[in-house]
Image (cartoon, rainbow, N blue to C red):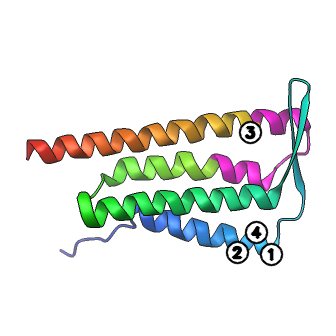
Amino acid sequence: MKEQKRIKPQTLFVVTAFLVSLANFLFFKSDISIQLYDTYYVISQKFVAQLLSMICIACFTIYYVFDKFIWPLQNPLGYVHYSLTVIPLLILLVKPIEDIQVITLLAIVAAGLLLLAQIVLIVNIIRTKRAQIQN
């Protein structure tokens, strides 16, 4: 029986970075308004798209370097890391609603999930290293 090839997390990150960069040039033209306490922030959608692309490229680099030079990271935690990194920022980028309070809540949740994603990456590195040591 033929072994089924899976898409690695680093491939997902680089494809997402490319697609978001392409969409950035073609579609994103509006602003995202966020209000925290008494301060009102206006951020361009282009900036959020560039930020997401840079985060994806950084994550791709981390996974690629670990895969080629150190040890391959575990794919299931890589998929969780990808989902927690990309999906909240894509929701914020698409801006499904114009209500400033909802957008602010989405921004806070996206920041929290992005932080959680980086913790998942660190856990993935530690678990993979521990499995390497035991074998």
Residue under numbered circle 4: 24
Tell me which corner region of the image, top left, top right, bottom left or bottom right, holds residue 111. top right
Estimate the spatial distance between the alpha carbons at disc 3 and disc 1, rounded to whole Å: 23 Å
The image shows residue 62 at horizontal and vertical percentages of: 41, 57
Q: Residue furthest left?
A: 135
- The amino acid sitting under disc 1 is Leu
* Kind of residue at disc 3: Ala
- The residue pinned by badge 1 equals 26
Q: Residue at x 45, y 68 (%)?
A: 11
- Magenta highlight range: 88-105
- Disc 2 and disc 1 in contact, CB within 8 angstroms: yes
Compared across the picture, whether 56 is left or right of 72 comes to right
Figure check: 97 above or below 108? below
Answer yes or no: do the residues labelled 3 and 1 have beta carbons within 8 Å? no
Q: Residue shown at 60%/60% (left/top)?
A: 54
Q: Is 26 inside the magenta-drawn segment?
A: no
Residue at 89% of width from left, 53% of height from top?
31
| Residue bearing mark 3 | 107
Label 2, label 1: how far apart the Cα atoms are: 6 Å
Q: Callout 4: 10 Å neighbours few (<14), some, many (20+)?
A: some
Q: Identify residue type, mark 4.
A: Asn
Image quarter hosting the N terminus: bottom left
